[in-house]
Amino acid sequence: MPQAGFLQDWLRRATAVDWFLLALRIVVLAVVGTGFVAGLLHPRYGREEWFSFLAFGLTIGAIYALIALGYTMVYGILRMVNFAHGDVFMFGAYAACFSLIACNRAGILNAYPVISFTIAVIVCIAVSAGIAILGERIAYRPFRRGRSLAPLISTLGLSFVLEYSARGMFGAQNKSFPTMPGIDGIVAFAGFSVPRVQLVVVAAAVLTMIVLTLIVMRTRIGTAMRAVAEDKDAATLMGINVDRVIVFTFALGGALAGIAGLLYGLVFKQISFFMGFFLGVKGFGAAVLGGIGNIPGAMLGGYALGLVESLGPAAFLEGLGVTAPYQLRDAIAYTMLVMVLIFRPRGLLGERLSTARA
Amino acid sequence: MTLLLSATGISKRFGGLLAIDNVNLAVPKAAIHAIIGPNGAGKTTLFNCLTSFVKPSAGEIYLNGARIDGLRPDLVASHGIARTYQNIRLFPDLTAIENIMVGLDAKSPESLLGALFATPAHHRKVRDTIARATALLAAVGLVGRGDRLARHLPYGDQRRLEIARAMSIDPVLLLLDEPAAGMNPVESHAMLELIRRLRDEFGLTIILIEHQMRVVMGISERITVLDHGACIAEGTPAEIRENSAVIAAYLGARAAKHGMDALERQG
């Protein structure tokens, strides 16, 4: 009987670590299961609430996904993590914030919201892509030749430089993000209601990801990116200027982070110089969750992280009688990350660096 | 006879190892030139120098009269040198036709905006690129396999695709690193035919590294023999066959008197 054979085989081979992991899986599944069942027995939330958790999860997940894409594309091409990416996102948020404030001063924010939004999108993309390109020049390219961890450390350093420059320029306190007219309020349909801004964010993020997919799959520079990711040397000898492709990759990732910054500001209405760190770690987590280097993986990982973080506390912590479960959402998100990596070390969609990259 | 490629005094030193020692190479237009030599003789390193993948420690390389040594590899490629690899280095997760389009695209950059807004000019360009890529696939005998991922192609087809990809940058000089490696006699005969056709139809100049003596002797007009990085002989196949230094390098001095025939019979 093959099943019994498998069990015997496992028992024969199992080491202490295997037993520990097995126990860990059982415990986690038991905790989640108990919490889930307990939550079902004493339902605390109605359909409406669950729907709004879901909507919020998709919103924050979209932002995570946009950030994760930048990590994953740079990793796919360079096998390196750009730790300054979160701060590129932060600068994008500030750029969007200041351009909306400027529009407001000029009096066009309320009169022409679409034009103002377009201006904000262009400015935040330009600023973030510019900073990403600059970062590549300063903190990455000089160290590319050596096979060391130097680029990793230098991007960490760049991250601090960016954070504290922002603190110096924009102040240490939170900055409130201008309110866009027309995206306030609640949209109701089929008995559910959802803040309009969340619809806007999800739509904008999906649109951005479609454009990204088209760039990567359909354009020449996208084909060049995929070629460089697979074999840098062979790509060079095909006449591809690898440096240019790398700069383009950083710029593309930066542009996505900039859009994420704008969307983040619209949803949370507050930005700070330090937020790049937290969101950067989440975005990196999302990229790893989906399988780093894998573009659809980053999208899936972002949404998965957002949904777990939003639904998780209500779904099983509440049932376990944890007080203020929502404050534990980060713990849940990272626990899930660890669990997924134990089961699937290469992430949900695998680390295949180039297969169906978009 | 005009020289397409002229390399003089090429040396490459890796630390204490002199991988290539003062090698000269003169290849006329539309010639098929072979480089042979025992393992570790420096053949692939010579290719790497020609493509600027490594910088030669000494020497000068001219292509069509223009000096190309020390240029960035992608610029050397745009001067018209393309190569294939001993161990196939396709882009495994791109489709066959995409592999070729990488090279076609690198030659004529497009505007990103044109692609995003799908302008008619962009469509024309894409149609043109696909047509050319399809023609190249046909030229190496891969009709109808354009949509398959490179890694799903059988080994012989991958070798052919690698040649088509090299052709995509519209080269004047094609460097083939063991094109018939791992092929049975029938396949390697087909490969010979293909190489000859590339020269005749496209007017390409071809330099190939090859171990199978049957292939080398059957196709090349001139042969350069490397051993321990140095050029020990240069000449027509008939001359090389009789050259005792070459036979000694391959079979050891004692076997030299049995001649090259035994080696050729081995394949």
Image: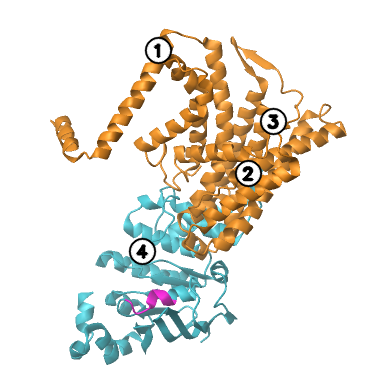
Chain colours: A orange, B cyan
As rendered, which of A350 and B99 lies closer to the eye?
A350
Give the quarter of the figure containing the C terminus of chain B: bottom left
Q: Secondary structure at mark 1?
A: helix
Where is residue A125? Give x, y as percent.
69, 43
Residue hosting label 3:
A270
As rendered, which of B42 and A102 lies closer to the eye?
A102
Q: Chain of mark 1?
A: A
Q: Secondary structure at mark 4?
A: loop
* Pointer 3 with pointer 2, Cβ within 8 A: no
Q: CA distance from mark 4 to mark 1?
A: 59 Å
Q: Are marks 1 and 2 on the same chain?
A: yes
Direction left: furthest residue? A1
Tell me if residue B111 comes above or below residue A204 in the rendering: below
Q: Nearer the viewer, mark 3 or mark 4?
A: 3
Q: Report the amino acid beneath label 1.
A: Ala
Task: Reply yes or no: does residue B44 show up in magenta.
Answer: yes
Q: Chain of mark 3?
A: A
Tell me if residue A11 comes above or below residue B197 in the rendering: above
As rendered, which of A60 and B86 lies closer to the eye?
A60
Q: CA distance from mark 3 to mark 4?
A: 55 Å
Q: Earlier in the sequence, mark 3 or mark 2?
A: 2
Residue hosting label 4:
B87
